[in-house]
Amino acid sequence: MDRMASGFINGLIGVVIFSGSLPATRVAVMQLDPLFLTVARAAIAGLLALCLLFVFRQRRPSRSDIVSLVVVALGVVVGFPLLTALALQHVTSAHSIVFVGLLPLATAIFGVLRGGERPKPAFWIFSSLGSALVAGFALLQGGAASPIGDALMLAAIIVCGLGYAEGARLSRTLGGWQVICWALVLSLPMMIVLSLALMPPTFSGVALPTWLSLAYVSLFSMLIGFIFWYRGLVQGGIAAVGQLQLLQPFFGLALAATLLHEPVSWTMLAVTVAVILCVAGARRFAR
């Protein structure tokens, strides 16, 4: 198997794992405060990451890597989880999932700025078309959507795209799973302190689905998914593999409909199918 094919397989596994993040977060914020959920999931994942680094005796990152690790931590450990948790108090997970269609464009832009990649002009046409379809969907929602929720989701996409691209750039020298582990460990002390400070007085009313959702976003969304995702970005290229994120709304909408019984309109499905079609053209001209 060549490097590009391996990159797409690893990237696709990461996308499938990430697809469950927003539905799981939606379930969790019904009973847990978004701020507590954000720091708790990072603290749990950080402790697991610390164990992995210790067991496999990984070398410490150099001083020149610290700034990049901070960017990764702010983007994918804190920024995206917090902003999406806040957004999901105003919009459904089905609505928010469609915004994920903007992630490939954000990741590609930061891949150019931080990763030094140079996709062909046709790539930007397909990527921009997919993003325009997503933005148009949000505008067409009118009163059914929340301006606050949409603004939070857009901010989440921007910081996540930066975290993806910066992490992929650093993975070339530090290693894919090592990057997310060190980013989690770097933020671990603060996450533990904040988890204790924001912990609710009692968990007696927290149902099992909430605990399962917390476990999913802590173990899979914050750690395992990134192991595959960063490896895929390094092998296949940030811009090329990043277009696989256009498939994430499709998987996410299916989960939102089957697990949460949230309404999925024909408009949502049409937009999702349209942006998925854009991934073929974007992938062809990514390099």
Image (cartoon, helix red, strand yellow):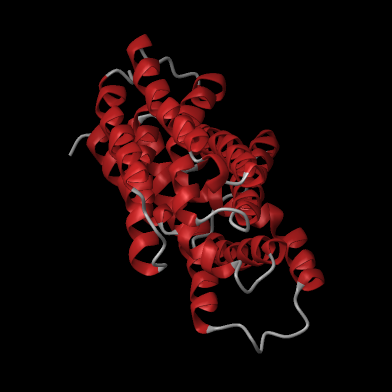
Task: Name the residue located 52 percent from the left edge and 68 percent from the top edge.
Answer: 27
At x 39% / y 40%, what residue is drawn? 245
Above-or-below relation of 22 to 158: below
Front in this rendered view, residue 263 or 60: 263
Q: Nearer the viewer, residue 278 or 212?
A: 278
Residue 105 x %, y %: 46, 27
Task: Let me know if residue 276 appears in the view.
Answer: yes
Q: Residue furthest top?
A: 121
- Residue that sits furthest to the front in the current view: 143
Vertical arrangement, residue 256 with respect to residue 113, above or below = below
Number of numbered labels in the structure image: 0
Could you tell me which residue is drawn at 51 percent across and 29 percent down? 106
In the image: residue 257, left or right of residue 4: right
Q: Position of residue 224 (x, y in %)?
A: 44, 58
Residue under the image location 69 percent in, 67 percent down: 33
Quarter holding the C terminus? Answer: top left
Viewer can see residue 172: no
| 95 up-or-down from 168: above or below | below
Decide if residue 48 is on the left or right side of residue 103. Answer: right
Outermost right residue: 197
In which image quadrant can residue 243 be found? top left
Taking depth in this image into account, of 195 and 19 the one nearest to the observer is 19
- Which of 229 and 147 lies nearest the eye of the viewer? 147
Location of the N terminus by quadrant is: top left
- Residue 238 image position (x, y, % from top left): 42, 30
Of all residues, the one furthest to the left in this rendering is: 1
Picture coordinates of residue 275 (x, y %)?
33, 33
